[in-house]
Image: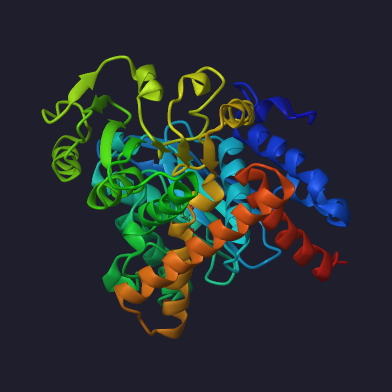
Amino acid sequence: MSQHQIPSYLTPHGIGPWGVYLEQIDRVTPHLGALARWVETLKRPKRALIVDVPIERDDGTIAHFEGYRVQHNTSRGPGKGGVRFHQDVTLSEVMALSAWMTIKNAAVNVPYGGAKGGIRVDPKTLSQGELQRMTRRYTSEINIIIGPNKDIPAPDVNTNEKVMAWMMDTYSMNLGSTASGVVTGKPISLGGSLGRHEATGRGVFVVGCEAAAKKGISIQGARVAVQGFGNVGGIAARLFSEAGAKVVAVQDHMGTVVRESGIDVTALQAHVAQHGSVVGFTGAEAVQDRAQFWGVDCDILVPAALEQQITPDNAGQIKARIILEGANGPTTPAADDILHDKGVLVVPDVIANAGGVTVSYFEWVQDFSSFFWTEDEINQRLTRIMREAFASVWQLAEEKKVSLRTAAFIVACTRVLQAREMRGLYP
Ligand code: GLU
């Protein structure tokens, strides 16, 4: 457990995501040398905005939602990170997600700080009109702290290109001119980037191939289990299966399906597009007990849903040799220790899922220059950045005999705190 005093209002259940993040920082601190003097910087978000988001519902009633935008750190550049719409969003969660963005952006060396936003809402309960009004009001409320040079939102859980279009339009209307660089993950026709939609899943796949090579596992025939079948898990599953791997289990928020000989991922994607979940898919066997997913016999496990999924309660059952963290914060520090003892290679979120923000960076650069790249150029640059980030973190982990997570945090925290030190304190 972290020795930090965590205010109770931030952590109604256990140490919460922010507590997990603080513990990760404690683990890296002994490796930071003289820069450790600045480490407290990483334990305090620079700025956190809590906003009330009222909307008129279609039936004439008024609903209020709580929204957040947290800018964890801006030492290396503007804030950057997604916006999540989910019924379980809390300030603790958004703080942790913003901090993981700081670490991620520094780990892959894109010139951003870290930020994140969210609204506590189940978007499935809203009509399209209500969703648009909520998105626009939220954007107006956080308008004072976002901007192409200040803080650039992007999609995250339950947000997409359409939500980004509304955010871009709202910000631009308030400004009086079109500012396409205020968000990334936009539709292509509004200055979005080719390859952005697939980028997070593609990045997971790229580092998955690197990790498999280190472990002597051939992707051809490798058994892959995926939790979360959205923009990250669904696309990673498709790329693994196209490369010859067998996707043997998929779990989403509604159910779990397994098939030892490999699930037809394209057919499952079509089913999910039509029915909203893997439930009822006839091309695989349904498993009723959700917890059984963790014990599935597989080589590569990809948690690509929400945080704090792999805990001491299930880490012992995991048979996979590699875990690729498509989600942010899916593994708790105590579970990390169990996996480490079992010899499971955990490729941490801040590397594994950094493909999304990497192509967000490409989108932002393209918007500034109004000059757009081909999809091949984007995928090649993405692949290069992901491979290099994985290789340098791997090398450091070997040198220091630490986990890939600690190595990634050493690389990232060193970059952030060096920038912090060089900039100095103002005033
Ligand atoms: N939401 C994504 C993440 O967690 C992407 C953020 C971005 O592109 O700014 O990394």
Q: Position of residue 423 (x, y in %)?
A: 80, 70
Residue 103 relative to residue 295: left or right = right
Q: Which quadrant does the C terminus fall into?
A: bottom right
Work out whether residue 117 or residue 206 is closer to the camera in this orientation and state it.
206
Colour basis: rainbow
Count the marks: how many?
Answer: 0
Give the residue displayed 36% in from the left and 18% down from the top.
292
Residue 68 relative to residue 423: left or right = left
Q: Which residue is most to the front? A: 216
Q: Which residue is most to the left? A: 282
Q: Is residue 382 above or below residue 16?
A: below
In which image quadrant can residue 261 be found?
top left
Q: Position of residue 70 (x, y in %)?
A: 60, 50
In which image quadrant can residue 169 be found?
bottom left
Q: Position of residue 146 (x, y in %)?
A: 55, 63
In which image quadrant can residue 377 be found?
bottom left
Q: Is residue 33 above or below residue 344?
A: below
Residue 381 relative to residue 397: left or right = left
Residue 174 visible (yes or no): no
Give the residue displayed 29% in from the left and 38% down from the top.
126
Residue 344 visible (yes or no): yes
Work out whether residue 162 or residue 138 is closer to the camera in this orientation and state it.
162
Q: Position of residue 136 (x, y in %)?
A: 39, 55
Work out whether residue 368 or residue 39 is closer to the camera in this orientation and state it.
39
Q: Which quadrant does the N terminus fall into?
A: top right
Give the residue displayed 60% in from the left and 32% down from the top.
340
